[in-house]
Amino acid sequence: MRICLLSYRGNPYSGGQGIYIYYLSRELQNLGHEVHVLSGPPYPEVADGITLHKLESLNLYESELRPWQEIPRLRNPLRLYEFLAVSLGTFPEPFTFSIRAFNHLRALTPEIKFDVIHDNQCLGWGLLLMKRLKVPVLATIHHPIPVDRHLALSQAKSPWDNFRLRRFYSFIGMQNRVSRKMERVITVSENSAEDIHPQGQA
């Protein structure tokens, strides 16, 4: 099979996403599959023989936000949205990466035709657009982000902190809806499965 793995972040040393993608892609290749990885920055490390497609972003969470330096890069509507969203305290990366990934996959077709697209907990609107490519789209959910939001809100010390956290986690609504439209959802433990299924949440 020709498999496309999606990872909106791929740090190979922290956070787990890059580590998961490294081992998953390597083992799929060892089984005889052709594996491509689409990732936003920070980019993962991949084993020899695996194709890594680096999708650029403003990567504003890895650098200090300096509006006057970003202006030349904001001519693209998606980059402008990304900049404004981060400036307002939200987390746009799952959405913006999914749109960039869809555009990239659409440009590759029909030169490269994938048998399956496997998302690593991005769950952005772009995954629904990928269905137009007539390729099965599935997702891994390591743990439901609403659990993180609940824990963070329980420690909020003021109404402002509560508002700020709800604004940051506003992407959860998108992930919840997108996860329900996947052909298949994979999770990594019984605890995660129990957290995901009863709540119907991503």
Image (cartoon, rainbow, N blue to C red):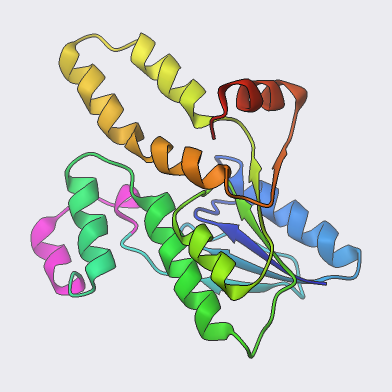
Magenta stretch contains residue 69 = yes
The quadrant of the picture occupied by the N terminus is bottom right
Give percent across and percent down for residue 148. Answer: 47, 24
What residue do we see at 84% from left, 57% from top? 27
Left or right position of 35 against 144 = right
Question: Measured along the vertical axis of the image, is residue 25 above or below residue 108?
Answer: above
The quarter of the picture where residue 105 lies is bottom right
Q: Outermost residue, right direction?
A: 31
Q: Nearer the viewer, residue 67 or 97?
A: 97
Tell me if 114 is positioned left or right of 180 in this view. Answer: right
Horizontal side of 14 relative to 115 (left or right) equals left
**Is residue 55 in view?**
no
Seen in the picture, residue 161 relative to 52 is either above or below; the reply is above
Toward the viewer: 150 or 9?
150
Q: Which residues are magenta?
A: 59-73
**At which x and y percent is residue 87?**
17, 46
The residue most toward the left is 68
Please name whichever residue, 145 or 87, is drawn nearer the observer in this view of the structure.
145
Q: Residue at x 64, y 90 (%)?
A: 111
Tell me if I can see residue 87 in this picture: yes
Residue 67 falls within the magenta-colored stretch: yes
Quadrant location, the C terminus: top right
Task: Answer above or below: position of 191 versus 201.
Answer: above
Residue drawn 39% across the image and 54% down it:
95
Residue 122 x, y percent position in the rendering: 52, 49
